Image (cartoon, rainbow, N blue to C red):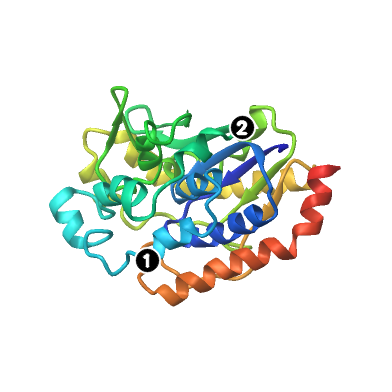
Amino acid sequence: MYQAGLVLEGGGMKGVYTSGVLDFFLDKNLEFSSVYGVSAGACNMSSFLSKQKGRAIDVMVDYLDTRRYCSMESLLTTGDLFNVEMCYHLIPDYLWPYDYEAFNAYQGKAFSVVTNIQTGKAEYLRVRDMKRDIDMIRASASLPLVSRNVKINGNYYLDGGLSDSIPLQKSILDGNVKNVVVMTKEVGYRRKPSEHLALIKLRYLKYPKVYQLMSTRHINYNETLAYIERQKENGQAFVIQPRKKSDVGRVEKDKEKLRALYKEGYEDAAACYEPLMRYLEA
């Protein structure tokens, strides 16, 4: 196990890129002492730490034709675009069984990054038991407008990407001198202001911090990109990310596009394997 942080960005269905990277890591038996997953990154973290190669991409792709998995029907009847019962209970317990014992054997620390919509702050919830703590993963992946608020210990949470899209700074503050950052946005990407602020303001009248976060998210995200570049230069970050823009949407239904982006992630990880090893072992 490398004494290093592994930081996994979200990005909706673009997260299949990360699935490919992590499956390459599994093939090489790479382990990290701390893992920070945000949104889709938290979901990818789950299958990575249970060492189930192929599970993350299969879960994202195989059920796309099932209305109960991700559909307007689910959104209108349950309040969640991605059906909670299917995604967090039926799939891991029956359809594509999760290896809870393998996760429990992990000797490092796993964190699901969530946004407390009452305080507007990021929280880094330690996942110790995947079955018991599954709502921490669900909260991190609960996108605004298309997900219900997730209640954990009396607090309400949504997508971790609202408050800390790429928690490299948190990993460094936790003492990780070396960090591997897997991003889903391509080289040169810069976030633009949200087009849904009016809906956000109306939907979250009781939680004004959500609107505040969304209105400045592009600024904070782009500042984070600049921070990551500085950490790359001083040796505290090794970044793996797409080299070109993907046409995969945040809620993508085209299986061929998703499989292609997964393959791209796997191949990008393979291409940088030698410099990655030099970085981790220096």
Circle number at residue 9: none
Quarter occupied by the C terminus: top right
Q: Mark 2 points at which residue?
A: 108
Residue 83 spot, x, y in % from top left: 25, 52
Q: In this view, does 240 lie above or below 3?
A: below
- The kind of residue tagged 2 is Gly
Q: Can residue 184 be seen in this view?
A: no
Q: Can residue 6 be seen in this view?
A: yes
Indicate the secondary structure of the residue bearing disc 1.
Answer: loop
Write the residue at 81% across / 56% down.
275
Which mark sits nearer the N-terminus, 1 or 2? 1
Q: In this view, does 79 lie to the left or right of 17?
A: left
Write the residue at 58% across / 35% down.
106
Quarter occupied by the N terminus: top right
Q: In this view, does 77 lie to the left or right of 266?
A: left
Number of disc labels: 2
Indicate the secondary structure of the residue bearing disc 2.
Answer: loop
Determine the residue located farthest toward the left in the rendered image.
Answer: 77
- The kind of residue tagged 1 is Asp
Determine the residue located farthest toward the right in the rendered image.
Answer: 282
Q: In this view, does 204 lie to the left or right of 232?
A: left
Give the class, few, some or many, for how many residues have Cα within 10 Å of label 1's Cα (few <14, many ≥20).
few
Residue 269 spot, x, y in % from top left: 68, 61
Q: Mark 1 points at which residue?
A: 62
Residue 270 spot, x, y in % from top left: 71, 63
Q: Cα distance, mark 1 to mark 2?
A: 30 Å
